[in-house]
Amino acid sequence: MSDQPVLEVRDLSVAYGYGPDAARAVSEVTFSLGRSKVLGVAGESGSGKSTLVYGLTRLLRAPGVITGGDVLFHVPGENTHTVDVLSAGEEEIQRLRWAHVSIVLQSALSALNPVRRIGREIDEVLRVHRSEMGKAERRARAEELLALVGLPADRLKRFPHELSGGQRQRVMIALALALSPELIVMDEPTTALDVVTQREIVSELYELRQKLGFAMIFITHDLSLLVELADEIMVMYAGRIVERAPALELYRAPRHPYTLGLMESFPPLHGERVEMTGIPGSPPDLRDLPAGCAFAPRCAYAMDKCQTENPALSAIEGGHRSVACWLHAKGHSAPVELSRRFVPAGGEL
Ligand code: SF4
C-alpha cells in the first residue's frame, strides 16, 4: 500500500467547446504521482498545464469539458479506498477537496474574501470540516498554521488588503495545509510575486513538504523554480506532455527542443550570465493543431517527418525519462545540445 501512488491520471483529455471548433486544451495526458512526491508541470501560457489541474480536480467550468480519461485518487489510512474523481458525486468530491486534496491558485487576493479577517477565513475551513474541534482548538490550529508558513499570530486579525502579496500567498498555503491533505496542487502560486519572495516561498514549500510529507503538483512557466522543489518535471506543449524526467536530469540535460527553449527563457540560478534567447513564434491555435508535431513551426531542428507525423511520448535512456520528439527515435541522431550526457549527481548545476 505504501508504494501505491496518491494520484493516477490516465489519458485525460479536456476541450473548450464542442465539435470541430473545440479547442483541445489537454490531450491524452497520463501520469501518476507517488506519496510525498513533487511533480512540477512547466510550459508557456496556453500549454494546457492549468486546464490539466482544473480537469483533474473537477474545478473545470463551462465551456471546458472532459472528453476522455480517468483520474483516480487513492485515499490512504484506515478507511483506504479509491475515488474515481471524474465520476464521483458532488458530495464525495467536496469530501475529497480540502481534507485530501487542496488547491492554491495564482491570485491570493481574489481567492481570499476581502471583507473577512484571515482568522475567520481559517476558522471557517476548520469549523466546516472538523466539527469535533472547539473554538479554542480551532484558534490554536490557526496560529499553528500561520507559524508553519512563517507568519506571526497577529496576522489572524488582519484583512487580506492589509497583507503583502507574499503574506497573502502564505495565508493561502496555510489554508491548504489546514486539514493535512495528502496532495496539494499549486497553480502558479508565486507568479504575481517578486523574485526574492518567489524563492522564499519555494524554499518554505520544500521544507513543509519534508516536514509534513504531502505530495504536490506545482505548476509554473519558470522551469528554474522547479529544479529546487520537484522530484520530477513534466513539460507540456499544446496540451500534451512533450518531456518527462527526474527534475535535475531534465534541468541539466533537456531532450526536447521546447524544454531547451524554456530553459533559455529564464536566467540560470548559478554560473555565468548568459543572454536569454527565448522561443521564437507563439503557441499554436488549439482549435487547429498541425497534423505533425505541434512545435514544428517554432523548432530549429524540424525535419520533413515533423510536418506530417506527431511523435508519441516514448521512453528513452533506459526508461527513466521520456520525450515526444523524432530526434530521439530510432535511426535519428539528436544534436549535441539535446544528447549530451547527464552530469552525475554531486556536480555543479
Ligand atoms: Fe522539433 Fe521535430 Fe522534435 Fe517536433 S519532433 S520537437 S519539430 S525535431
Image (tube, rainbow, N blue to C red):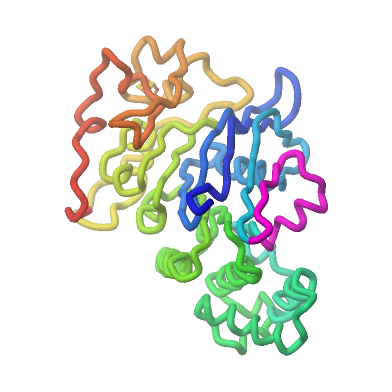
Q: How many marks?
A: 0
Whole-percent x, y for residue 284 in the image: 53, 27
In the picture, residue 61 is in which quadrant? top right
In-image side of 304 versus 42 (left or right)? left
Q: Residue at x 42, y 21 (%)?
A: 296
Nearest to the observer: residue 159 or residue 29: 29
Q: Position of residue 269 (x, y in %)?
A: 29, 57
In magenta, the rendered stretch is 78-99
Asked where in the image residue 175 lies, by quadrant, the reply is: bottom right
Quarter for ligand 1? top left
Can residue 98 be seen?
Answer: yes
Position of 37 with respect to 77 (left or right) is left
- 250 relative position to 207: left or right: left
Drawn side of residue 301 relative to residue 23, left or right: left
157 up-or-down from 47: above or below: below
- The answer to which of 294 and 178 lies nearer the viewer is 178
Residue 212, position as x, y percentages in the image = 50, 69
Residue 266 against residue 339 in the figure, above or below: below
Residue at figure coordinates x 34%, y 31% from the top left: 257
Task: Note whether 23 is above or below 246 in the view shown.
Answer: above
Which residue is nearer to you in this view: 234 or 115? 234
Residue 92 within the segment the image draws in magenta: yes
Does 142 appear above or below 248? below
For the question of whether residue 194 can be seen, the reply is no
198 magenta-colored: no
Residue at figure coordinates x 60%, y 41% from the top left: 52
